[in-house]
Image (cartoon, rainbow, N blue to C red):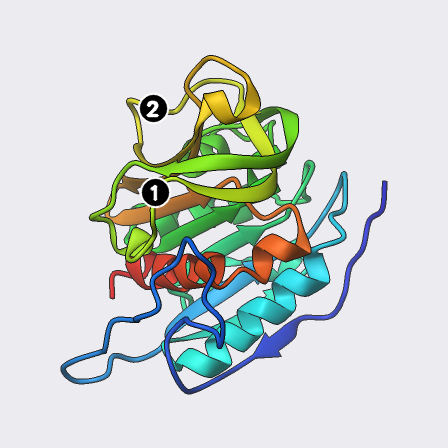
Amino acid sequence: MLRHRSPLLALTVLVFACGTASTPPHASASAPTPTGPAAEPARVLLVMATAGFRHDSIPTARAVLASLAARSGTFTVTATENPGDVSASRLASTDVLMFALTTGELAFDDGQKAAIVSFVNGGGGFIGVHSAADTLYQWPDYGRIVGAYFRDHPWTQTAAVVVEDRNHPTMAGVETPFRILEEFYTFQRNPRGTVDVLLSLDPQSVGADGDFPLAWTQSLGRGRSYYNALGHFDSTWNDPWFQRQLAAAIQWTAGR
């Protein structure tokens, strides 16, 4: 187990929305053209702290989100691996709180926990990526905000993913099904029925039976939450479609 704390890293930005030079087979080549007056960039506080397993893809994820912000001009990112940076005062100047590749029982005190719940219920956005569901098991409100807790990853392979809600803005231009190499999660309870499922694993592609949601959204008070179980490998973070849907998720959770 590795524990790591680095100084707060501010990443501020400007330019085009979330595409890259190449487009994989499962992504549309065209991106929506912004219309109307430009909104203020959504302010993202990116938490990447680990108190358990530490993903090798953390540096890539941080770099990808910084690059997306720089190319889009639609959001800014402040990245930290110090749980102490998540406070009521910092959240007051934040639009989206993102937990990406976090693990374990992070050191949040009761005041910080109350501030996070108040932030989301009061209209703030929350995004969880991959092992954000493998985090803070001892704090039930966090599990409610994410939508489910990690149970296992029985399949690490290339498999088919089905888009269930093609009308959601984060799914724009995504063909269904598409295939991707990933560490596919299952959860302690199936969140279907309490969340709006966007993506699910095609069980036949891994030789299994069952229902395996992979990405979903939900409303919490006046806030919005988005979770995506993909993101284990560098290759996922470098996938233009994955980048596009994360940028769209930031805009959606920020209410843009």
Among all residues in the image, which is located at the extreme left?
36
Residue at screen point 75% across, 42% down: 51
Q: CA distance from mark 1 to mark 2?
A: 19 Å
Q: Nearer the viewer, residue 146 or 115?
A: 146
Q: Amino acid at mark 1?
A: Thr
Total labels drawn: 2
Quarter in which the N terminus is drawn: top right
Residue at screen point 31% across, 51% down: 171
Q: Is residue 89 visible?
A: no
Residue at screen point 24% across, 49% down: 168
The residue pinned by badge 2 equals 192
Q: Nearer the viewer, residue 176 or 34?
A: 176
Asked where in the image residue 156 lies, by quadrant, the reply is top right
The residue pinned by badge 1 equals 176
Asked where in the image residue 230 lies, by quadrant, the reply is top right
Would residue 108 be found to the left or right of residue 71 on screen? right
Quarter in which the C terminus is drawn: bottom left
Q: Nearer the viewer, residue 214 or 73?
A: 214
Would residue 201 be found to the left or right of residue 52 on screen? left
Q: Nearer the viewer, residue 203 or 5?
A: 203
Within-10-Å neighbours for mark 1: few <14, some 14–19, many 20+:
some
Element carrying mark 1: loop
Relative image position of residue 48 (x, y in whole percent): 64, 55
Residue at screen point 55% across, 18% down: 207
Relative image position of residue 21 (x, y in whole percent): 49, 77
Element carrying mark 2: loop
